[in-house]
């Protein structure tokens, strides 16, 4: 497992069943298994590998006790050998050409990072309220790349030299660490491109409670972006008022991605968007005032 071309890093937290599906998809990759390694980072030390668990030959499972997926990813990076580092999550299933298409694009284009397409799959044909929301808002990688020069670690590849230059993920963030790192990479001049045929499949969140948990986690992460000296009560109140604005700009996205939705469903998605933005804003405000950010 030395000097691999590609290292795939997967943090996991009490998720062995879904990780098994992820690893099975990596066993079926068209990319030569002798040229990539898989590093699974278990982020819950008390949760041991289940008996008889199937681990691919090019995969190793390690443990990182520091809470948070970014601490886990950093540990994986530090132990990896690839000149290209790829990331996905334990609940994701990779298309068989995922690594092949990502590497081919990186090697034939003038860029240092890529964000691949993330397809959602659903529990049933009739979408729940949460799934309707996810259909519009989840993992719009092309938008992230074009608007901010960022990409999420559910499907992201980068040359190692980018990490050597800009550093690792911030381990104190329990959410938004991929965004914060991407901004550093962008500002350092490392180009990113969106790659439509480097595909990861991700389950849509099924229940509103899952969306609420994520909204709180995102709020805590956003609070962590600020400088400590800037977290005074007055500034936090001003930021809260700003963050509580109705998300009017999202109407355009709902119209674009929700062409097959009924008007009532579009209105529902907008309401959920606003509701979650309020939850995120409140959590960000509370963490800025001293509350501990939650992993959820």
Image (cartoon, rainbow, N blue to C red):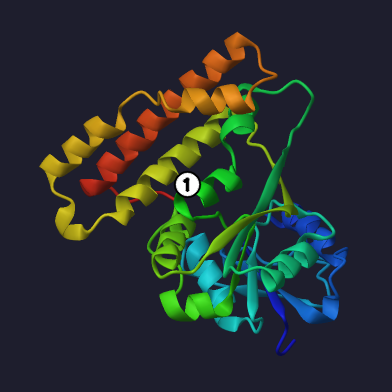
Is 31 on the left or on the right of 170, as rendered? right
Instruction: Say if residue 16 shows up in the picture.
Output: yes
Asked if residue 278 is positioned above or below residue 187 in the image, the reply reads: above
Figure label count: 1
Eyeballing the image, is 79 above or below 109? below
Of 110 and 215, the residue lying toward us: 110
Residue on which the image places disc 1: 147
In this rendering, position of residue 125 left or right of residue 79: right
Name the residue at 88% across, 63% down. Answer: 28
For the N terminus, the quadrant is bottom right
Please name the residue shown 55% across and 81% down the image: 78
Q: Position of residue 116 (x, y in %)?
A: 66, 55
- Quadrant hosting residue 57: bottom right
Q: Nearer the viewer, residue 53 or 8?
A: 8
Instruction: For residue 170, say whether it is visible.
Output: no
Instruction: Give the side of residue 58 with respect to residue 138, left or right.
Output: right
Left or right of 18, for residue 78: left
Q: Quadrant of residue 277?
A: top left
Percent coordinates x, y for residue 271 in the rendering: 47, 19
Q: Position of residue 231 (x, y in %)?
A: 18, 51
């Amino acid at each position: 497992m030395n000097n691999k071309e590609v290292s795939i890093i997967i943090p996991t937290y009490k998720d062995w069943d879904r990780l098994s599906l992820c690893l099975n998809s990596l066993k079926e990759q068209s990319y030569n298994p002798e040229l990539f390694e898989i590093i699974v980072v278990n982020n819950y030390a008390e949760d041991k590998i289940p008996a008889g668990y199937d681990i691919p030959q090019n995969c190793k499972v390690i443990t990182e006790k520091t809470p948070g997926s970014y601490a886990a990813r950093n540990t994986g990076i530090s132990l990896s050998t690839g000149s290209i580092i790829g990331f996905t999550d334990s609940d994701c299933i990779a298309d068989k050409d995922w690594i092949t298409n990502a590497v081919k694009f990186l090697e034939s284009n003038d860029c240092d990072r890529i964000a691949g397409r993330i397809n959602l799959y659903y529990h049933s044909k009739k979408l729940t309220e949460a799934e309707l929301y996810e259909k519009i808002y989840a993992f719009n990688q092309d938008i992230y790349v074009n608007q901010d020069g960022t990409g999420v670690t559910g499907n992201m590849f980068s040359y190692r030299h980018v990490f050597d230059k800009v550093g690792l993920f911030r381990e104190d963030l329990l959410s938004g660490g991929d965004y914060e790192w991407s901004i550093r990479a962008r500002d350092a001049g490392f180009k990113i491109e969106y790659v439509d045929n480097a595909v990861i499949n991700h389950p849509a969140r099924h229940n509103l409670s899952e969306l609420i948990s994520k909204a709180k986690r995102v709020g805590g992460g956003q609070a962590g972006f600020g400088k400590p000296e800037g977290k005074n009560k007055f500034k936090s109140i001003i930021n809260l008022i700003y963050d509580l604005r109705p998300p009017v700009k999202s109407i355009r996205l709902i119209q674009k991605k929700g062409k097959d939705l009924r008007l009532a469903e579009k209105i529902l998605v907008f309401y959920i968007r606003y509701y979650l933005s309020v939850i995120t804003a409140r959590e960000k405000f509370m963490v800025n005032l001293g509350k501990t950010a939650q992993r959820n």
